[in-house]
Amino acid sequence: MGKTREKTEISDGKKSKVLIIIALLLAVVLISAVVIVILVLNSKDEKAEKNSHKAAAEKYASSLYNKERFGDLQEVQMSDEVFEAYRNSDDFETDETNYIAMVENLDKENMSFDIKSVEKGDELSEKMLFGAEVYFREQAETYDVDLSGISVTEGYRYSIELDVISGENKTSTKLEPYIVNIKDSGWKLITGSLTDLEEYADEGGYKE
């Protein structure tokens, strides 16, 4: 009897250890799953933030007058298909060379630019979104890219304020571009001071 009880106690002890190990393994698996979910969600949030309208505006502002970021400056102003065609054309290298020369001349004159603020303004009207589609279609024609099926789904007017520093003098200048969302290309910028989207809409035959 004593030996049987002893064997039973040993057997129960082994079962308890096994159950503890299983519980620990399950806990590790559960914690790992939670960590993976958190990482995936954070990754999605970071991707969404990078693809946001404000990120596009900030990308444009930080690329201005930066000789290392000519490609970024152009990419944010074109649909993906058009930028790909432009980047592979002779125009890209020529334009980049001219841009770098311009920035270097500004450097020689001790002129620099700092981003003071990037603020979202009013949402664009349906007519202006239509005008943006016309604008990008016309831009695409330059590089023989067909954007007849382009869809601009959302847009905002932005205010980008820059400090212009020349020697000991500092002044401010404000840019008011449009930031629009092109389906399959993401958020893109149109320089507002040079473009009237309502005029583009009228040219494209917009009807109320």
Image (cartoon, grey):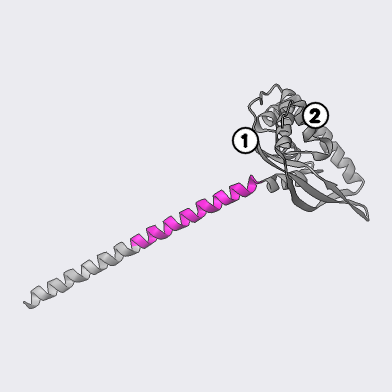
Residue matched to label 1: 183
Spot occupied by residue 106 in the image (x, y as percentages of width and height): 89, 43
Q: x and y percent of residue 131 in the render?
A: 74, 32
Q: Position of residue 74 (x, y in %)?
A: 74, 36
Q: Of helix, strand and loop, which one carries label 1?
A: loop
Give the residues in magenta: 25-52
**Residue at the (84%, 39%) spot, across then down:** 193
Q: Is residue 35 left or right of residue 181?
A: left
Tell me which corner region of the image, top left, top right, bottom left or bottom right, holds residue 128: top right
Front label number (2 vs 1): 1
Amino acid bearing label 2:
Thr
Q: Amino acid at mark 1?
A: Lys
* Image quadrant where one finds the C terminus: top right
Residue at image mark 2: 94
Q: Where is 86 relative to 14, above or below?
A: above
Secondary structure of residue under mark 2: helix
In-front residue for pair 134/136:
134
Query: Is 32 colored magenta in this rendering?
Result: yes
